[in-house]
Image (spheres, rainbow, N blue to C red):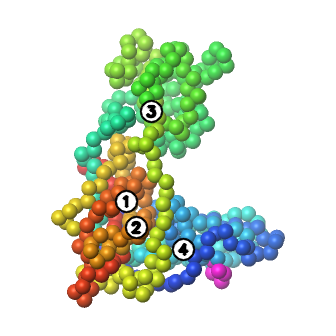
């Protein structure tokens, strides 16, 4: 993943326009025959979704706000050409003309370029990640990848297989075979015998394991060892018993669960900026900056570090006159992964800043702070 490029030298150009945001459950403006739907997505220059962007239909009172995936939707629109405008504090607005059909759904994408002056990115490398808990061994082997084949949570979710045997069949060296009783068995490298199967470190039946009794979306990861000597020692038993291969299944838990999305933001933030109750970076004499004497301690999510996943987070918040993140103002503008989001949220809760100065006095400032998760050096 490419690193997030921040325009630290760009000016903060904002179109501060106040309007009332109306939820997407609005009354249709079209006739009863009009069934056109407009669905879309708002992203930043990196292609990542922008949450909390305001989207409006020109010439109407229809407005909505993008969700955590940057998505928006309008239903019951009249056919013909309509104009759509998207804006978000700290970004340059974008607009597009769309020709809607008499029925059906039209999709659009809007990309907003950043105009806010950002702080220097905080780099998170995670060189000191220590794995603990039930999944520690799995994460350690996943990071090294010295032996075996790994199927990560991200791959499981991308494949979206109906059952576990269907998912495993897509792995090179794995095939399916009908077994007595009408079931389906997994075989490795065209062997005719069943592999050893372990779930969370516990051996399953010594016979043919019912893999399809385990839902793929309940798993954090899978390890596949096709040879008799490649599996970790504790999961080999004896060479003869492991000669047909070994499968290690790891279920999800609290340590790997993704937090629910949160797209809350400070109500009327654009109005506060417009009324000078909160200042932007170009309106102060000295910008708010992280206190260098108290660096942020941001934990690299173990599951993402082990899988060599890099990412970015762009946080938006108000730094108060005392140099702290003002309660209720933290919003994640864009993020490449929910676990990165959660790590940033936790770290910012105890962050200390040097407050912004205007006319020699501390003032509240709206801050855009990028975070780059780089993994190992």
Name the quadrant containing residue 185.
top right
Question: Which residue appears at 42% of the width and 87% of the height?
Answer: 275
Nearest to N terminus: mark 1 or mark 3: 3
Q: Quick check: marks 4 and 3 in contact, CB under 8 Å?
A: no
Can I make out residue 84 in this image? no
> Could you tell me which secondary element the residue under label 2 belongs to?
loop
Residue 322 vertical placement versus 285 (above, below): above
The residues tagged by marks 3 and 2 sit, at their Cα atoms, a distance apart of 34 Å
Give 97 or 316, whichever is nearer the viewer: 316
Query: Is label 1 or label 4 in front?
Result: 1
Residue 345 has which mark? Answer: 1
Secondary structure mostly seen in magenta is loop
Instruction: Give left or right: position of 276 versus 351.
Output: right
Q: Name the residue under label 3.
A: 250
Name the quadrant containing residue 213.
top right
Residue 110 has which mark? Answer: none
Nearest to N terminus: mark 1 or mark 4: 4
Give 324 or 252, whichever is nearer the viewer: 324
Residue stretch in magenta: 57-61
Which residue is most to the top? Answer: 240
Q: Mark 2 points at which residue?
A: 330
The residues tagged by marks 1 and 2 sit, at their Cα atoms, a distance apart of 8 Å
Instruction: Decide whether residue 204 is among the magenta residues.
Output: no
Q: Residues within 10 Å of mark 4 (few under 14, many from 20)?
A: many
Q: Mark 4 points at which residue?
A: 54
The residues tagged by marks 2 and 4 sit, at their Cα atoms, a distance apart of 17 Å
Can I make out residue 159 in this image? yes
> Could you tell me which secondary element the residue under label 1 belongs to?
helix
């Amino acid at each position: 993943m490419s690193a997030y490029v921040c325009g630290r030298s760009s000016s903060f150009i904002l179109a501060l326009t106040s309007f009332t945001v109306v939820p997407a459950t609005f009354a249709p403006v079209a006739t009863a025959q009009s069934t056109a739907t407009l669905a879309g997505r708002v992203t930043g220059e990196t292609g990542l979704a922008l949450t909390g962007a305001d989207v409006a239909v020109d010439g109407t009172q229809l407005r909505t706000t993008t969700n955590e995936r940057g998505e928006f939707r309008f239903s019951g629109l009249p056919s013909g050409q309509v104009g759509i405008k998207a804006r978000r504090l700290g970004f340059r607005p974008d607009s597009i003309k769309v020709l809607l059909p008499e029925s059906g759904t039209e999709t659009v994408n809007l990309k907003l370029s950043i105009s806010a002056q950002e702080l220097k990115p905080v780099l998170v490398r995670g060189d000191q990640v220590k794995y603990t808990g039930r999944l520690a061994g799995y994460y350690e082997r996943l990071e090294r990848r010295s032996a075996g084949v790994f199927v990560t949570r991200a791959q499981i979710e991308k494949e979206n297989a109906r059952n576990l045997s269907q998912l495993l069949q897509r792995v090179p060296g794995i095939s399916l075979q009908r077994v007595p009783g009408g079931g389906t068995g997994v075989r490795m490298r065209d062997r005719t015998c069943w592999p050893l199967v372990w779930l969370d470190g516990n051996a399953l039946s010594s016979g043919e394991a019912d893999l399809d009794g385990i839902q793929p979306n309940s798993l954090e990861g899978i390890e596949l060892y096709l040879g008799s000597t490649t599996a970790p020692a504790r999961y080999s038993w004896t060479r003869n018993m492991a000669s047909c291969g070994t499968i290690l299944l790891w279920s999800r838990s609290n340590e790997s669960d993704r937090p629910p999305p949160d797209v809350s933001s400070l109500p009327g933030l654009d109005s506060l900026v417009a009324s000078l109750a909160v200042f932007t970076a170009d309106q102060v004499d000295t910008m708010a900056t992280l206190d260098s004497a108290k660096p942020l301690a941001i934990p690299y999510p173990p599951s993402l570090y082990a899988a060599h996943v890099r990412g970015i987070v762009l946080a938006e918040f108000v730094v108060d006159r005392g140099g702290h993140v003002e309660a209720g103002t933290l919003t994640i503008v864009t993020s490449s992964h929910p676990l990165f989001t959660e790590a940033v949220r936790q770290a910012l809760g105890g962050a200390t800043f040097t407050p912004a100065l205007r006319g020699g006095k501390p003032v509240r400032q709206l801050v855009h702070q990028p975070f780059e998760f780089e993994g190992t050096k």
